[in-house]
Image: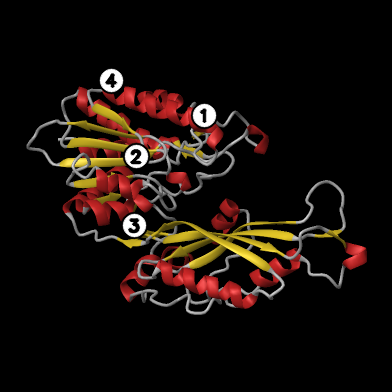
Amino acid sequence: MLNQYKKLLTQLIAFKSVSTDKSFKPEIDKTADFLNDLLKENSFESRIIKGYSNPIVVASYIADPKYKTCLIYGHYDVQPADKSEGWHSEPFALTEDKGRLIARGVVDNKGQIAIHLTSVFKLIKESNLGYNIKFMIEGDEETGSSHLESFLKDHQNLLKADFTIVSDGEIVSQIPVIETGFRGGFDIHLTLKTSEIDLHSGLYGGAAPNCAHEAAKLLSKIFDENNRVAIPDFYNNVDQISQEISKNNQNVPFDFQEYQKMTCTKALLTEPEYDFCTQVGLRPTVQITGLESGYNGEGYRNSLPPKATVKLNFRLVKSQKIEEVIGGVKKFIKENLPDYVDYEIKVGNQFEGIKLTIDNEYVVKAIDILEKAYNQKPLFKYCGGGLPIITFFNDVLKLKQVIVPLGNEDCAMHAVHENFRLDNIEKGLKFSYDFLKK
């Protein structure tokens, strides 16, 4: 299957399906058209559904009306990439080096959905498919999938299934993983203003307000000395972490030197009582993801900036109430900015966190097949990232879910030289094929 997989992925990678930049919309449309045609060529009834931001490809194949139906989700949109950022090769051309395939989207998520496409197509040709299959492949995951909940509500009959498989993440230390939960969250875009004009730093510095200073003072109050969020009431409703979950998380391998290598950082800044896995999987956080103020070109302008913009990403756990947290954040900002600073807050990309029940027959089957494919028992892991579709599948379609990431832990997702290890691909193909066969 590997050769067929590489051929398919080479074609899919070539589309610059960047959803965060509207100038790539033609590439987005071409990608949806390619997937729609591909599915039809492989005996699926397939259609492109528009009206929910970027096109969504939905396809169905009936192997036997008596069989259970598996809905397989993936996304074809990717993060931006340009060779000038340090790529050794064109990021939208699949290359192979030292046992890895390299390209933008090779793991997130084209390479992982291509594993399921390849195995399903092979099983159809062999008349060996053990489930009826539906594919739902969307193009807005990298921008928050804000229209997906409405799409699912409007097309419940079209997407009706017994369970779903989602592969969009990473394994741990080459050990297979079944993900059991995801954080939710939201984003804030904060604009601060202290003047209408830049002010000469010699003539006014030390007397007039400086917007960059005000932004820095505000941001310095978000965390305390123990790396806990200092916004009042931020931890309201956060679930207690049971002894069973704590014990499970302690079984998830963590190597500080490997962490340093992958993150290119020098420290681990968790709350004192929590390990890495618990911190990112089950504790909420706030992260500054964008900060801009003043002159940042060559040389110096030596003026007081009148404006500053801050982007904040909030990651919340299951039982936190998003609207309550947003209200608390707005109050915190208001109380910690002086009256001479005008500000505007924009909130976006809200989605709920989720903890999954994994006591279903499909997860039991996945555990057995993963162990055979990897020759190791899978770990159960709470993921610090967010996959809104998991929450929507649970709340809207009421589906049993099997969340099996297939990417290698050092895949550089969203970064330069995003890569997929060939041995992981082969194990992923084996898992998908064996799970879905008769």
Residue 224 in sight from this viewpoint: no
Across and down, in percent, residue 200 comes to: 89, 60
Across and down, in percent, residue 190 comes to: 60, 61
Which element carries disc 4, helix, strand or loop?
helix
* Left or right of 369 on screen, residue 223: right
* Left or right of 315 on screen, residue 401: left
Q: Amino acid at mark 2?
A: Gly
Judging by the rendered image, the residue that carries numbered circle 4 is: 41
Q: Amino acid at mark 4?
A: Glu
Judging by the rendered image, the residue that carries numbered circle 1 is: 96
Q: At x 44% / y 49%, what residue is drawn?
A: 144
**Mark sitting earlier along the chain (1/4):** 4
Judging by the rendered image, the residue that carries numbered circle 2 is: 428
Vertical side of 191 occupied by 10: above or below: above
**Mark sitting earlier along the chain (1/3):** 1
Between residue 142 and residue 206, name the one nearer to us.
206
Between residue 160 and residue 271, name the one nearer to us.
160
